[in-house]
Amino acid sequence: MKSVFLFLYYRPMKTEHVYIHFPFCISKCPYCDFFSVPLNDETIHNKYIEYLLKEIDNYDPVISNELKTLYFGGGTPSLLDPTSLKKILAKFEINARTEVTIEVNPASADLGKLISYRELGINRISIGSQSFLNGDLKTLGRAHSAEDIYECYENSRKAGFENINLDLIIGIPGQTTASVIYNVNEIIDLAPEHVSAYILTFYDNTPFTKKLEKGTLTKLEDDTEIEFFELISGILEEHGLNRYEISNFSRSGKQSKHNMNTWDFGNYIGLGASAHSFMDGRRWENPESIENWYYSVINRFTGYSESAITDEITLKREFVMLGLRKTEGMSIDSYNRYFKSDFLKEFENKLDHYFSNKTVLAVDGKLKLNPERFSIFNTIVSDIIF
Ligand code: SF4
């Protein structure tokens, strides 16, 4: 009876981290697994904003008065007009210390829009560049060209952005060592504060995977992808973009606070269709359908009151997997406090082997994966915690 009571009346602490999902795109990229739909009807856009505002109100009891991070992701949030953004931003307390990021498709952000974003308090731009070669972009089915990236980057600087991320995809079919080096050199020349580099994933049921199965598209060998990643990583680090997480590089002090909160197992609320949230051990996902999400918003469903706490074993695995992604490692103290446990004792049997061959290191209260072994991250982490 007691547990039922707690489940019904549970209300978590307030979070200072909010993610907002805008699921519309110019067109659907054939490799994409995110929830996104082509935006071809302005009335849908307006209704979506109206419901986002309602959902923010629904979650008001658990959103802090002052935010540390606010992240507009997608989809393509740069399709949002500044007037809609202004209405959303007016719902939150943000100040100069709040990291406010918006993901931008290079083809959908002109100078006027970027200036408005900056004036509204957005201070970080994440440009979905992916590659600086039009051939790669065509293969990926992207709606932008290399020229759009340069223009968007230059306009972002003109608009006053001092914190810019560029995305890079590695493992694009047909990619060569020369094209990888070309891409990383273009990044070095532009000198962004942050780079996210990801190996292309072939998700089930995407047009890319179907082509792969039919044999009309060829995936690079896994070893080649890793070799390309290491090549890029080395060049970025030589130029002051330090790897602070498996896939992320930044200049000093420019790590993504939004992402760091996730890897540090911090609470956050995700708003919008398909957005994920994590609060005090409870994880939930909003409906992955705009109509179903409308229904949940109008009926005032809030994940923290509807979802059960995740079992402890799963939470422990998530904590370790997320923490070890960072080059600084996972805080052993935080683990022990969170789970009222002794991590080094709990995993002693598994860790001894990895300590002795220096795959895993315990330094200054942090458990770190040797960066040279990041390429086999999944194997090592699974072995330790499963
Ligand atoms: S722009 Fe991004 S979210 Fe939209 S379809 Fe392409 S990869 Fe997916």
Image: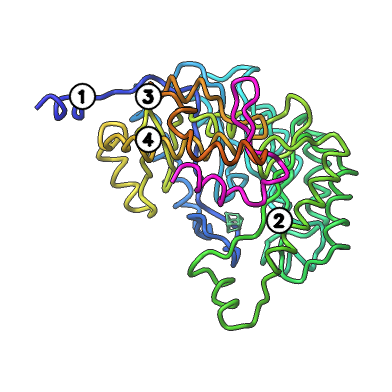
Q: Which residues are magenta?
A: 360-386
- Name the kind of residue labelled 4 in the image: Glu
Q: Position of residue 338 (x, y in %)?
A: 42, 23
Is residue 371 rendered magenta in the image? Answer: yes
- Tell me residue 168's x, y (percent): 73, 52
Q: Secondary structure at mark 3?
A: helix
Residue denoted by label 4 = 55
Amino acid carrying label 2: it is Ile
Can you identify the residue that label 2 sits on?
169
| x and y percentages locating residue 361 in the rendered image | 64, 32
Alpha carbon of mark 4 to alpha carbon of mark 1: how far?
20 Å
**Residue for badge 3:** 60
Q: Are marks 4 and 2 in contact (CB under 8 Å)?
A: no
Query: Which of pointers 4 and 1 lies earlier in the amino acid sequence?
Result: 1
Q: Nearer the viewer, mark 4 or mark 2?
A: 2
Q: Are marks 3 and 1 in contact (CB under 8 Å)?
A: no
**Element type where label 2 sits in the image:** strand
Please rate how many residues cluster around mark 2, counting C-alpha atoms within 10 Å: few if below 14, some from 14 to 19, many from 20: many
Q: How is the image coloured?
A: rainbow
- Distance from Cα at disc 4 to Cα at disc 3: 8 Å
Q: Are marks 4 and 3 in contact (CB under 8 Å)?
A: no
Asked if residue 276 is positioned above or below residue 89 in the image, the reply reads: below
Q: CA distance from mark 2 to mark 3?
A: 37 Å
Alpha carbons under labels 1 and 2: distance apart: 44 Å
Crowding at mark 3 (Cα within 10 Å: few <14, some 14-19, many 20+) = some
Location of mark 1 (residue): 9
